[in-house]
Image (spheres, grey):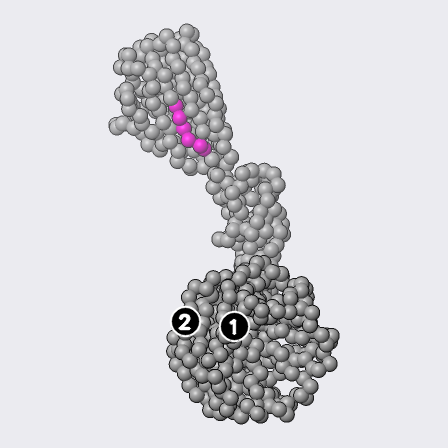
Amino acid sequence: MTIRKLVCGVRTACLFAIALVGLTAASGQNAFALSPGCTFLQKFGGGTGNGFFSIHFGYTEKFHLSFNAGEAVSLSLSDVGPNLLGTFYSFDMSPAVNGFYSDIYFFSNNAINVTWPILTNSALLSIEVTTFDPNTVVTVLGNCASRNPPSAVNTIAPTSGAASGGTAVGITGAGFTGATGVAFGGSSAASFTVNNDNSITATAPAGSGIVDVTVATAAGASVLSVADQFTYIGTLTPAPTVTSVTPDFGALSGAEVTITGTNFLTGITKVNFGSVGSNYFVVNSATSITVQAPDGTGSVDLTVTNAGGTSPTSVADRFTYTAANTHDFNGDGKSDLFWRDTAGDLAVWVMNGSGIASSANLGNVSPSIWSIIGLRDFSGTGNADVLWRNASGDVSIWFMNGASVSSTASLGNVPINWAVYGTGDLDGNGTGDLLWEDTSGEVAVWFMRGSSTISTASLGSVPSNWSIAGDDSNGNIYWRDTAGDLAIWQVRGSAIAASASLGNIPPNWRIAGFGDFNGDGVTDILWRDSTSNTVAIWFMTSAMTISSSTSLGVAPSTWSIVQTGDYNGDGYSDIFWIDNTGNTAVWFMNGGTISSSAGYGNVGTTWSVQSMSAE
């Protein structure tokens, strides 16, 4: 009699192919004996005494076993050889010591496959192969395939940490190799590193109360125990929410926006417009934040972040960047026209692309006393306002609502040696500011909010041969000297953040206007040659360089460019013309291409467009 015995560990799945050589069903037998560590849950067959069960060729049966830890597993037996002698298996399950069953007999002259699943308790399954014929060759084909058991967490250190998360926790135990996750209760660790099979370092996520720290592997999650418990200390900071933004649009250079929401008081770390963070925000209360929009384009989500997380996005937090528009009186995103005749009569055309949507007369203001020195949104309503100054130096604003004056305000008196040369948004709060220069070359800024001067700043002095050619809604001041040299100051708040020279341009080329002609959010420069009447555009970059230029051709000398603006609301600045008889027209632009044009009739020779500081 030959005995072959193979013992498989608890973390093993085994497949044996036993080839029986030189045996017949009558003359030989193999005895597979289950060790006392195993028991059948039930007998197969009926009656009393020993159970008996036969498997005919071609069938497979599974026999359920129960091990020490009470785990139910399956034992599969199958005959894989040819049916030469009517193969059958006989199972004599006689009660053995302690009530366990043993002695399972197989009678076959073919190969027999015996398979059992992965076992996860502490028992061992022992198989003995017994042959009574010394000529029998017993061959075990293949090896047992190893697999790690579920991991076990023995200790964690430290056992507590802040509710906001971020605590580095060392985990010791067994079976960590190949770990696929670490969890603190129902939340995944912020990060984890498997140091070796017995050690993991994990970063706790935000949480509260007492939670189990578990390690997941291919075999499952580690068994819970008091040794794996982690206690969160303190109160978890709730993430902010944003319920509204006001206004929900603003100029490309930025606007002052009020955010309404919840959970703003605790540790606000950043406010983002899309992926770009604002450099300035003030927490007013638990439900209100005032923020200055950074440069941007299109529609973006405005989000607020604290230690508890970042506010979820929704349609309520959307902010839309609008192209710089100095003369949109009704806030519809289209530039309008403000007219004045030689007698002082005032009128507004509310534009709608190739047509005039409406018009209105605004009365008469004597031109010998008051002059219009700027058109810009000073109040942050989205409607352009009208800036006035009289011969004595008094400054006043008309706050507009479409084609009507909603209110007026006085800004005081400024000595007449000072003049306003621009109304661009120089501090990026979304409203126009006043750019002043006196006769000695001193340059100063009034930073405006409605009828209030928030602050003032001196930008220094420039030589008398340099003059301001214009400014824009991106905080740029354009300078040109008597020799034709061109330069830019980039103003951020009360300081000149950067400057650049654009070279020398022959004096016969004159700046005819500014505008964003290609819709990239950067102000471009419109030129006209006074000799040839050629019209051209310099497309600028935010780095104050010329990216490209294009010629728009020659326009008759009888026609003059009087204003630029987006008259059809497509995001591209257009060019408004008037000839010496009063005929009006617009070139609708698309980058360096005139996409179409339109005429608005004749206004006579006594009316002129008020186009100061327009782009």
Amino acid type indicated by mark 2: Ala
Q: Is residue 258 visible?
A: no
The residue sitting at 40% across, 78% down in the picture is: 601
Residue 566 in the image: state x and y as whole percent: 47, 71
Q: What residue is pinned by disc 2?
A: 598
Please, what secondary structure does the residue beneath circle 1 have? loop
Residue 234 in the image: state x and y as whole percent: 58, 63
Q: What residue is pinned by disc 1?
A: 557
Camera-side residue of 348 and 123: 348
First to last magenta residue range: 114-119
Packing grade of label 2 (10 A; few <14, some 14-19, many >=20) is some
Quadrant of the image occupied by residue 467:
bottom right
The residue sitting at 38% across, 10% down in the picture is: 21
Quadrant of the image occupied by residue 595:
bottom left
The residue sitting at 28% across, 19% down in the picture is: 57
Q: Is residue 481 visible?
A: yes
